[in-house]
Amino acid sequence: MLVLTRKLGESIRIGDDIILKVVELDSRHVKIGIEAPKNIAVNREEIYERIQKENKAASESKEQNIKNIADALRKNKKR
Amino acid sequence: MADFFSELVYSKEDIITFPHGIPGFEKNKEFVLVQIPDFVPFEWLVCVDGSKLRFAIINPLLFRPDYSPNISKEQLEELQIEKPEDVLFYVIVTIAENPLKSTANLVGPVIINKTKKIGKQIIIDDDRYTIREPIIKGD
């Protein structure tokens, strides 16, 4: 991994059109400003990973189980 | 139980393209929406690239009528939405060991432009919602 040292207010440019800027610093946090083209999704890594994991779990849902919960939902509605 | 999807009939015009796939399945880009009476109110997002990938999905408003995540214009730009009627809005369902405790992912809604046939799972930055929101409340 490339590691660069930056001071508060300084930036890093990635390719032609992505800029990361250090906008705030304290002993435990760093706030980063991001400029990127609109078609580039910017997400916190841990959230992206959780969504990936959840999608994998969701893809393993069995049809029979979905049917069971569908039946339960329809019953709920009738009540 | 019969495989409902093995003989799925659809036409080319039904295919919805997810230009980036969805997180965890970035290479799977072509899906169709399937409604089967047995599964109502759930629908299926079925990948048609030969993989057996499929997701049970549901309109979140059916169990969370107040669901209104903050979605930015930029996140939607790619979907080329021109009018509200273009939009289909779903969340993906994960079945728990006890199906009645199953959850839906309210942090990653799936938005589809049904006119242009483009889809995307958006990741929202909104503390009010969780990845595992119970579909049936209580108990």
Image (cartoon, grey):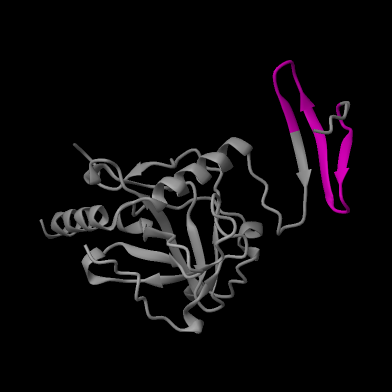
Residue A16 among magenta residues: yes
Give the residues drawn in magenta, as a range: A8-31
Residue that lies at the very extreme toward the left in this rendered image: A79
Rendering quarter of residue A2: top right
Q: Position of residue A30 (x, y in %)?
A: 74, 26
Q: Residue at x 40, y 58 (%)?
A: B55
Q: Residue at x 44, y 60 (%)?
A: B53
* For residue B54, above or below residue B24: below
- Split into 4 quadrants, where in the image is the N terminus of chain A? top right
Q: Residue at x 44, y 42 (%)?
A: B131
* For residue B84, above or below residue B76: below
Answer left or right for A48 relative to B93.
right
Q: Which is nearer the eye, A62 or B14?
A: A62
* For residue A16, above or below residue B85: above
What is the count of numbered marks? 0
Answer left or right for B136 relative to A21.
left
Q: Which is nearer the eye, A55 or B48?
A: B48
- Split into 4 quadrants, where in the image is the C terminus of chain A? bottom left
Q: Position of residue B4 (x, y in %)?
A: 29, 69
Residue that lies at the very extreme toward the top in this rendered image: A27
Q: Position of residue B139 (x, y in %)?
A: 18, 36
Q: Which is nearer the eye, A59 or B137?
A: A59
Residue B17 among magenta residues: no
Rendering quarter of residue B20: bottom right
Q: Residue at x 51, y 39 (%)?
A: A50
